[in-house]
Image (tube, rainbow, N blue to C red):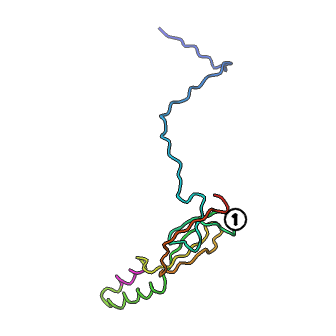
Amino acid sequence: MAIKLETHNAPSDTPVEEKPVWQPPQPQQPMETHGNAGMGRVTETLGIEPDFIDCSFCQKRNMTTVKREPSQATLVAQFFCALAFFPCCTLCLYPVPKKREWWFNTRHKRSMCDKDVAFISHDINRIDARYVQSQFGS
């Protein structure tokens, strides 16, 4: 006994209604806000971390990039580490001041136009962080 199935490959005039696939509700995350939203830091008060400033070249509020560089005090410390423990531990202790970033200077650059903003010597303590309303918005 054979069963015959009829199939029709002709296009149908009635539109096929697709049902949306159910997805579980996503938890809403609160909008990320910063304590200095819309504010720029005064360049004289920049610290060792990147921060927002008003760029006079780009006419925008930009984040700075930070590069830490060894100072002369770091190199002197390396020399004394090598000299004090000569010859037994010279190779072990010579790189310590540089690896631990002892007495490093900090250089801030603008992230967009790569211009120097500030140079902070290793012996300056910046405690006050002054922010002003940004001239260029966000």
> Residue placed farthest to the left in the image?
88
Depth check, front residue: 102 or 33: 33
Judge from the rendering whether residue 85 lies leftward or rightward of residue 73; answer left or right. Answer: left
> Residue placed farthest to the top in the image?
1
Q: Quadrant of the C terminus?
A: bottom right
Coordinates of residue 113 in the picture (x, y in percent): 66, 69
Residue plotted at (67% across, 61% down):
136
Q: Quadrant of residue 66?
A: bottom right
Residue plotted at (52% across, 58% down):
35
Q: Quadrant of residue 20?
A: top right
Coordinates of residue 57 in the picture (x, y in percent): 69, 69
Residue that label 1 marks: 59
Q: Secondary structure at mark 1?
A: loop
Asked if 41 appears above or below 87 in the picture, the reply is: above
The question of residue 92 being in magenta is answered with yes
Q: Amino acid at mark 1?
A: Gln
| Magenta segment boundaries in residue numbering | 91-97
The question of residue 116 being in magenta is answered with no
Coordinates of residue 77 in the picture (x, y in percent): 41, 86
Residue plotted at (53% across, 30% down):
21
Asked if 131 appears above or below 1 in the picture, the reply is: below
Coordinates of residue 134 in the picture (x, y in percent): 64, 62
Q: Quadrant of residue 64?
A: bottom right
Residue plotted at (47% across, 79% down):
104
> Magenta region's main secondary structure?
helix
Depth check, front residue: 5 or 47: 47
Judge from the rendering whether residue 86 lies leftward or rightward of residue 68; answer left or right. Answer: left
Judge from the rendering whether residue 92 lies leftward or rightward of residue 37; answer left or right. Answer: left
